[in-house]
Image: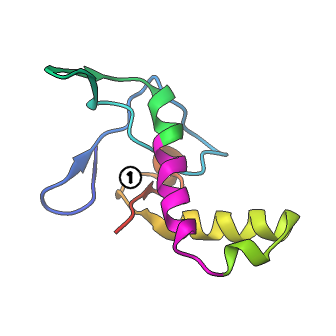
Amino acid sequence: VGRLNRTHEFFHDVSTCSGHGLNLVGPGVSIFIRLGEDILCEYQGTSYACPIVVGVLIAKLSRSRDYLYYTKQSRHDFAKRELYGLCQNLNMSPLRQGHGLPILS
């Protein structure tokens, strides 16, 4: 279990990736999806983490005037720095959280 602050606790499911090479974490439980006008379902799974993290990064990059001026590897490096800059430490082992959880404020 990790803690972002006094009111937000997080856990890293033992069935998900961990160890060297883990760059960051994303949400994979309590993902609510609207299936109809009156239907809201709760899902879980690591497949949800990647698109959520990418959405956070896209929102961050859309605010940047510099991103479009970079090309190829320098654009990749810029995006990576921006993403890691959004990561909040969850006070878990780096083997469980990497750089942390990207949060857009």
Task: Give the labeled residue for mark 1.
Answer: 92
| Of 46 and 19, the residue lying toward us | 46
| Of 92 and 74, the residue lying toward us | 74
Say whether residue 53 is magenta: yes
Element marked by disc 1: loop
The x, y position of residue 95, in whole percent, is 53, 47
Q: How is the image coloured?
A: rainbow
Q: Residue at x 60, y 51 (%)?
A: 23
* Residue 83 falls left or right of residue 42: right
The x, y position of residue 100, in whole percent, is 45, 56
The x, y position of residue 93, in whole percent, is 44, 51
Q: Residue at x 47, y 49 (%)?
A: 97
Magenta stretch in the rendered image: 52-65
Q: Quadrant of residue 48?
A: top left
Q: Quadrant of residue 18?
A: top right
State whether residue 25 appears in this view. no
